[in-house]
Image: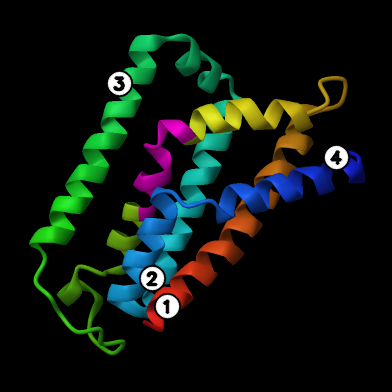
Amino acid sequence: MALETWVAFLAAACLISISPGAGVVSCLGAGLRFGLARAMWNIYGLITGILFVLVIVAAGLGALLAASTIAFTVVKWLGVAYLVWLGVQQWRAPALPVDANAAGSELGGARRQLYWRGFLVNATNPKGIVFMLAVLPQFIDPARPLVPQYAICGATLMATDLVVMTAYTAFAATA
């Protein structure tokens, strides 16, 4: 991948990460409720979810989902159902003070739970798959080996998302 192409992709990755969406809401909620240190597990899950979507797109399944109305609709409604379920869980959760020293399971903030919550937010987001389908091909040179290009794009997306989501979470944790 040429340096100019990578810099352009870095700019796009920054804009993708900064734009509000389900991941930002997830980070803000986790930061408010659990503080930065524990909420980092949510961010790790979000980043793994991005990697999962990237692999789907790179493998061509994203094109299949975009071409199949039924498959896209199923994925879309799974994502909607998961986000509604998260909202209901948050709504029904008792109001508890943030305590950085409390055990994670007392607040529903066990590392594993936060990680999987973050992963599912990004992995079930059909907008992410369609967006990757629209953005990634513009930066991939089909005449060059594809795996290294996708690896560079994936690492760039994960790094920018780590920085941006950490900033959102830290902001929320200070509230």
For label 1, the SS is: helix
**Mark closer to the chain start, 3 or 1:** 1
User: Which numbered circle lies on residue 74?
Assistant: 3
Q: Provide residue 128's location: percent of width, then percent of height.
A: 49, 36
Q: Residues within 10 Å of mark 4 (few under 14, many from 20)?
A: some
Residue that label 1 marks: 36
**Mark closer to the chain start, 4 or 3:** 4
* Residue 121 among those drawn in magenta: yes
Q: Amino acid at mark 4?
A: Thr
For label 4, the SS is: helix
Q: Residues within 10 Å of mark 1 (few under 14, many from 20)?
A: many
Label 2–label 3 contact, CB within 8 A: no
Q: Amino acid at mark 3?
A: Val
Q: Provide residue 122's location: percent of width, then percent of height.
A: 42, 44
Label 2–label 1 contact, CB within 8 A: yes
Asked whether, in this view, residue 169 is left or right of residue 1, the answer is left
Q: Amino acid at mark 1?
A: Leu
Residue that label 4 marks: 5
Please report the residue visible at 54 percent of the width from the left and 71 percent of the height from the top: 167
Magenta range: 118-127
Q: Provide residue 119's location: percent of width, then percent of height.
A: 40, 49
